[in-house]
Image (cartoon, rainbow, N blue to C red):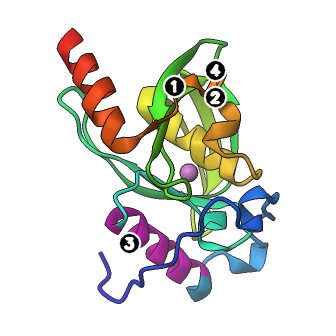
Amino acid sequence: MNESARLLEVVRLGHPGLRAIAEAVPEEWFSSGRLYELGRDMVRTMIEEEGVGLAAPQVAEGIRLFAYWVPATEDEAEVPPMLLANPEVRPMGTEQEEGWEGCLSIPGLRGLVPRFRRIKVKARRLDGEPVSLTADGFQARVIQHEHDHLDGVVFLDRMTSISSLAFEPEWERYVLASEDGED
Ligand code: NI
């Protein structure tokens, strides 16, 4: 990681930028120092804040750009930090599954959110090169969560019931502990 990357302020729910439709990254921004710098700072901020995703509107930049990564698990390799600009996200199939989400802009809360299990993504890299990928499971969840931020949508809006909403310490104590016990 570049040592000159800055830690950005993550805005929280109530900031109007989180409820706005972000603008496409302008063509002239690709390959620019301005975009590389923002991307680098977003990745550093995401990692230091212990998030797995961060969208530009969360750092008060109203453009269609997000960073994400997926830590390694027992079953799957790490997806290293990625930056996607002007993404288009399409479900592959209709299958959805519920999973727990949190958000750096809604600190301290977790909730169950249904997401498409498999998705197809078309986007641009910061140098402007097109990139397309498919994702499933947790990676697909993270991308759908971040993509929502570009349309002013947060995970609370996607919950089918607010009844699972929990503070993190209680979630760890009562929910995670019982789910671990099921394995
Ligand atoms: Ni979020």
Where's residue 61, x and y in %?
68, 73
Q: Residue 92, labelled with which disc? A: 4
Q: Are marks 1 and 2 in contact (CB under 8 Å)?
A: yes
Q: Quadrant of residue 24?
A: bottom right
Q: Position of residue 82 (x, y in %)?
A: 45, 56
Q: Quadrant of the C terminus?
A: top left
| Mark 4 residue element | loop
Q: Which residue is mark 1?
A: 164
Observer-nearest residue: 65 or 133?
65
Circles 1 and 4 in contact, beta carbons < 8 Å: no
Cα–Cα span, label 2 and label 4: 21 Å
Mark 3 vs mark 1: in front = 1
Residue 100 falls left or right of residue 50:
right
User: Which badge, 1 or 4, comes first in the chain's sequence?
Assistant: 4
**Which residue type does callout 4 highlight?**
Met
- Does residue 81 show up magenta in the picture? no
Residue type marked 3 = Arg
- The amino acid beneath tag 1 is Ser
Q: CA distance from mark 1 to mark 4?
A: 27 Å
Work out how far the residue at label 1 is from the one at label 2, CA to CA, in angstroms: 9 Å
Q: Secondary structure at mark 1?
A: helix
Mark linked to residue 120: none
Figure quadrant of residue 179: top left
Q: Which residue is mark 3?
A: 44
Q: How many marks?
A: 4
Marks 4/3: CA distance?
31 Å
- Extent of the magenta region: 35-48
Provide the residue designation for mark 2: 159
> Which amino acid does the dot numbered 2 rest on?
Met
Q: Callout 2: helix, strand or loop?
A: loop
